[in-house]
Amino acid sequence: MVHYPYMRKRTSNSKQLLDSGFWILDSRRAFTLIETLIVIAISAMLAAIAVGYSSVSRNEVSLSVEAAEVSQMVLEAKSLAIATYGNAAGACGYGVSFDYSNQTYSLFTYVPQGFPSCPSAASTTEIAPGDMQEYTGGTSKVAIANGVVLSPGSSNDGVAVALFYPPAPQTFIARNGDFDSNSGEYTFTNENSNIYLETVDGSASTAISVSSAGQVSF
């Protein structure tokens, strides 16, 4: 009879009997219940960390993209004020408004109510919601991206309205705190201001700077 080197006679721990009468070496012991629970717990913890990190990263990417898109719209308003000066009937300027309550922003055409013609830049000291006419449907009430929040700023000094008045164009800025509830108008302060954006979890933030000279940076 041929004896296979990897087999031996039956022992108390042997599990499988061959036709030859020899037994396979002891099989490896399986995980205990405690070991299984530990593995499950560690796997769950690692999965939670991965999901949390993925969410934070996604929000930070959304923040960067949204900052670029908001900046692009402000620059578009500035470009329109230069390019269409004297060509667009009824348009005295272009700008961008920010609605902090509804988390939207809009590109608008400046058409001051009650004026037969465009007022001079020197007399432009305030702006009412009715003076801001929709430019196009696609640039009106654009929602802030998911995972990102439009913040009014700690001092309520976030930009509410940025208006570009041709031909230079001259820049007029009204902050969120510059709204007069009695007159229903924003008063232009014409000081360097910021558009504040942050992630919903507060892990990251950025500010888009709009200067009184019309420079936009973030």
Image (spheres, grey):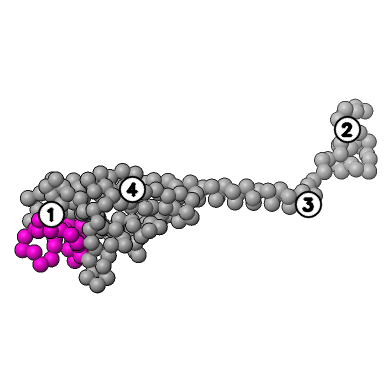
**Does residue 81 show up?**
no
Assess disc 3: are there few (<14), some (14-19) or many (≥20) residues with their C-alpha within 10 Å of its C-alpha.
few
Q: Secondary structure at mark 4?
A: strand
**For mark 1, what is the residue?**
121
In the rendered image, residue 10, in percent from the top left (x then y), is placed at 93, 39
In the rendered image, the vertical position of residue 115 relative to residue 201, given as above or below: below
Query: Which range of residues does the magenta coloring cover?
Result: 108-135
- In the rendered image, the quadrant that contains the C terminus is top left
The residues tagged by marks 2 and 4 sit, at their Cα atoms, a distance apart of 76 Å
Of 137 and 212, nearer the camera is: 212
The residues tagged by marks 1 and 4 sit, at their Cα atoms, a distance apart of 25 Å
Assess disc 4: are there few (<14), some (14-19) or many (≥20) residues with their C-alpha within 10 Å of its C-alpha.
some
The reply, left or right, for residue 107 in relation to residue 38 is left
**For mark 2, what is the residue?**
7
In the rendered image, residue 122, in percent from the top left (x then y), is placed at 13, 55
Asked if residue 149 lies in the magenta stretch, the reply is no
The residues tagged by marks 3 and 2 sit, at their Cα atoms, a distance apart of 32 Å
Query: Of the numbered discs in the image, which one, if any, rests on residue 28?
Result: none
Q: Secondary structure at mark 1?
A: helix
Query: Of the numbered discs in the image, which one, if any, rests on residue 208?
Result: 4
Q: If you read the primary sequence from the N terminus, does the residue marked by circle 2 or circle 4 appear first?
A: 2
Q: If you read the primary sequence from the N terminus, does the residue marked by circle 3 or circle 2 appear first?
A: 2
Give the residue type at disc 4.
Ile
